[in-house]
Structure formats: C-alpha cells, structure tokens
C-alpha cells in the first residue's frame, strides 16, 4: 500500500525535521513493502530539509501540487506561463516590491537579512538565491512589501492567477491556477482508492476524497467528514501516528 503523508504539522512539527521516532516508523513501513509518498505546501528543497536523507529519493509533491520530485530529480513543475510571469515581474518593478519567488529548486529572495521569514527561506542552504532575471520559471511568488500594497493587489486580482493574503494580511501569495495535490499524485500513476493518506489542511481534501483510508491529524472541519479516523494533536501525537501506521500496515499488508 502507498502511505501519503502531508509533512507539516502531520509528521513534521514546529518547523523541525521529522523526528527519529517517526523516521523509524517510515523505515518500518518500507521494510513491510509499503511506499511512503510525501506532500507539502513547501518547496521540494524545504521538504528535503525536513526528511532524513534515506527518503529524499521517494516521491515528493511540493507547493500543493506545483512540483513533483522523484529519485531526487524534479520531474514536473506547474508554473506561471512566460507571459504571466513577465506581467507579474513588471508589477514587482512598478511597485518596488520585495519578494520570495520559488523556482523548481532555486529561488529569488530580496527581503533582506532581517525580514521575519529569512530563517525559513533556505535554512539548510540547499538551493541558490538567484537574481530574478536568472530564475527561468516560478510556481509561487510571495510579495513581502510594496510601495502601494492596495494598488498592487488590485492589479494582481485582474490577472488569471490565485492571490491570497497571508501572515495576517502582511504578505501577498501568488500561485498559478489549478494546483492540486491529487492531480500531482495522479501524474505519478497513483489511482484512487489505492493509498492511505495522513493530512490536516484544506489542500488535502482531494486526497481525502480519493483515498482508500484517511487519517486526519488535529482539527479541521472541512476534512472531518472525509476522515476514517482522527488523531488528537497533543503530547502523544507521535506514538498515536506510529500505532495507527502499524495497524494500517497490517490491515493493508501486501498479499
């Protein structure tokens, strides 16, 4: 059976690496013949920083379905079109914006050394901070500051993209239309009712809707109706995840 894990706050907590305890669980699943697949809203670069190196060659889906990585190689990127990327870059210039722009592996960051997200950009120095003109493609653009945020948002809203305010409205997140973890999973050849999923946020809804068995970690009313079971997020969450995985490993043992 395939076990699909949403990384953040599902098996990786407080922006820290997956613990040795849960890493041993992933090793156990592999030894039993199960495949672990990891999904996240983060970049592939950041996902690898959360996982033990033993799992870097597993199937990884980053950016809520924007980037697929397998055997350590970027296989597919759902990115802004060249023309759309050019329009957004023009707005960045017009509004003197600072930003974090994610490419397939590398990125472009102009927020400076003291911006509150700087320690989250590339904590393990796995990528390279490129000049914007050297970044060939992008799947997420986060505007950190702009000379006129309101006007910039109005112009962005007129484009055929997804625009969200994050960090209590202080930053603007821009992504292409149509990102989907489930679509990315299908691209990897995974069929519905052929996997178990552990998740926690709205972007996991497509996975929950198509999985054989679903486990909700923590609280989320949008997912609760689709969850076969729910694990309370408390000091025992890791033992509960291990117990659940061992039970499901036996339930879906390879014949």
Image (cartoon, rainbow, N blue to C red):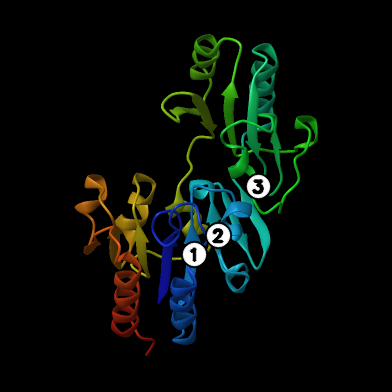
Residue 133 as seen in the image, left or right of residue 28: right
Q: Residue at x 43, y 56 (%)?
A: 13
| Relative depth, front residue between 243 and 38 | 243
Which numbered disc flags the more N-terminal residue, 2 or 1?
A: 1
Query: Going by the picture, which residue comes out furthest to the left?
Result: 225
Q: Which numbered marker is on residue 18?
A: 1
Provide residue 177's location: percent of width, then percent of height.
50, 35
- Pointer 2 local density, CA inside 10 Å: few below 14, some 14–19, many at least 20: many
Provide residue 89's location: percent of width, then percent of height.
68, 23
Residue 178 as seen in the image, left or right of residue 10: right
Above or below, 173 against 185 in this view is above
Q: Which numbered marker is on residue 252?
A: none
Q: Residue at x 39, y 87 (%)?
A: 254
Residue 241 as seen in the image, left or right of residue 15: left
Give the residue pinned by disc 2: 50
Q: Secondary structure at mark 2?
A: helix
Provide residue 62's location: percent of width, then percent of height.
54, 52
| Quadrant of the drawing holding the N terminus | bottom left
Q: Residue at x 51, y 49 (%)?
A: 65
Mark 1 to mark 3: distance in Å?
Answer: 17 Å
Provide residue 85's location: percent of width, then percent of height.
66, 28
Which numbered disc flags the more N-terminal residue, 3 or 2?
A: 2
| Quadrant of the drawing holding the C terminus | bottom left
Q: Secondary structure at mark 1?
A: loop
Mark 2 to mark 1: distance in Å?
Answer: 6 Å
For residue 250, what is the image quadrant? bottom left
CB under 8 Å between discs 2 and 1? yes
Mark 3 to mark 2: distance in Å?
Answer: 12 Å
Give the residue pinned by disc 3: 122
């Amino acid at each position: 059976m395939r076990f699909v894990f949403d990384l953040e706050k599902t098996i990786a907590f407080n922006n820290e690496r997956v613990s040795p305890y849960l890493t041993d669980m992933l090793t156990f699943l592999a030894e039993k013949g199960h495949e672990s697949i990891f999904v996240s809203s983060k970049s592939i670069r950041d996902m690898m920083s959360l996982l033990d190196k033993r799992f870097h060659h597993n199937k990884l889906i980053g950016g809520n379905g924007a980037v697929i990585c397998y055997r350590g190689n970027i296989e597919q990127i759902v990115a802004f079109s060249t023309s759309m990327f050019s329009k957004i870059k023009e707005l960045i210039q017009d509004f003197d914006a600072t930003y974090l722009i994610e490419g397939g592996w590398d990125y472009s960051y102009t927020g400076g050394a003291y911006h509150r997200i700087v320690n989250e950009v590339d904590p393990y120095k796995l990528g390279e901070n490129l000049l914007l003109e050297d970044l060939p493609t992008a799947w997420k653009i986060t505007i950190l500051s702009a000379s006129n945020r309101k006007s910039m948002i109005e112009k962005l809203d007129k484009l055929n993209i997804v625009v969200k305010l994050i960090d209590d409205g202080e930053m603007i997140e821009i992504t292409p239309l149509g990102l989907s973890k489930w679509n990315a999973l299908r691209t990897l050849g995974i069929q519905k009712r052929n996997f178990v999923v552990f998740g926690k946020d709205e972007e996991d809804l497509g996975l929950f809707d198509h999985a054989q068995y679903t486990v909700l970690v923590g609280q989320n009313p949008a997912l609760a109706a689709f969850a076969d079971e729910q694990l309370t997020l408390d000091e025992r969450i890791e033992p509960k995840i291990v117990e659940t995985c061992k039970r499901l490993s036996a339930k879906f043992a390879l014949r």
